[in-house]
Amino acid sequence: MLAQGLRPDSVTFIGVLSACSRAGLVERGYRYFESMSRDHGILPIHDHYTCMIDLLSRAGRIKEAQDFIHKMPFPPDAVGWATLLSSCRVHSNLEVGKWAAESLLDLEPTNPAGYILLSSIYAAKGKWNTVAQLRRGMREKGLRKDPGCSWIKFKNKLYIFSADDFSSPYYDQIYAELEKLNEKMIQMGYVPDASSVLHDVEELEKIKMLGHHSERLAIAFGLIFIPRHCPIRIVKNLRVCRDCHNATKYISKITQREILVRDAVRFHLFKDGACSCGDFW
């Protein structure tokens, strides 16, 4: 745009900063943010500050994101706090996560995201009593978490799966396919990441639950029914967990299939054991 004499506007920089965040380009994002007012006379608004919070916290620079918030000319909006809280969950930062959750709930006391994300951080730390208190608080306020589900289209029909779903008429084939894949994945070095399971159960039960997440059921369905020359396209309503992301890389390698997953955060193209997101999402 600059080379062709086009003047970037506020929306331009939202796109640029978001791209830097998705790619992990922290220093470049800083430079673009600082150039807004210095070089282009554009005053940053909430959206730009939220992009910067996302940029820093997504890269694991949680303390730096906290310092950035303290220097902002106004407090973050609900999206900004939820962004920080989500990254605190990914990077297991309980201290800053509590601060972000309290700030989010002050703004939106009926938003279940604050309770859900904070309880996820406590669960990863094994603080199950606190998790129970948070979940009880949600129930008392009449709040509920949207259940995770994944869907795939085949012959103009939509097939929807939830975790541990046995409602499909093809469930026996699907679970048999997952069992075969799991054996091959383990042989290739796959190690389940049970931290993604936020329930107070034994380790073996957690590993079993991981293997039946909705996106894996949808992928297994796709492997069975979608022709080999076609990519497998999955949509999930929530963020793909770290373990399923890792498992899907193995599955793409084993089966030599392209698997496209659209989760709540971004597109993931899995091919030959790698993901287009570079494990940064």
Image: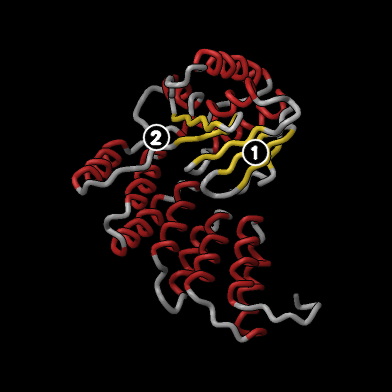
Please state which amino acid type lies under the numbered disc 2. Answer: Leu
Residue 81 placement: quadrant:
bottom left
Q: Which mark is residue 198?
A: 2
Residue in view at x 62 percent, y 31 percent: 248
Q: How many numbered circles are shown?
A: 2
- The image position of residue 127, as x and y in percent, is 33, 38
Screen quadrant of the N terminus: bottom right
Residue in view at x 56 percent, y 33 percent: 152
Which residue occupies the foreground of this view, 97 or 262? Answer: 262
- The image position of residue 172, as x and y in percent, is 51, 13
With 170 as the anchor, is 2 left or right in this view? right
Q: Is residue 251 above or below residue 281?
A: above
Q: Which mark is residue 260?
A: 1
Which residue occupies the foreground of this view, 77 or 159? Answer: 159
Q: How is the image coloured?
A: secondary structure
Q: Secondary structure at mark 1?
A: strand
Q: Please state which of the two labelled residues, at mark 2 or mark 1, is closer to the viewer.
A: 1
- The image position of residue 62, as x and y in percent, is 50, 58
Please state which amino acid type lies under the numbered disc 1. Answer: Leu
Q: Is residue 152 above or below residue 164?
A: below
Residue in view at x 61 percent, y 86 percent: 41
Residue in view at x 22 percent, y 46 percent: 142
- The image position of residue 190, as x and y in percent, is 62, 25
Q: Residue furthest front?
A: 156
Mark 1 is surrounded, within 10 Å at the Cα level, by few (under 14), some (14 to 19) or many (20 or more) other residues, namely: many
Q: Residue furthest right?
A: 3
Q: Of callouts 2 and 1, which one flags the residue occurring earlier in the amino acid sequence?
A: 2
Mark 2 is surrounded, within 10 Å at the Cα level, by few (under 14), some (14 to 19) or many (20 or more) other residues, namely: some
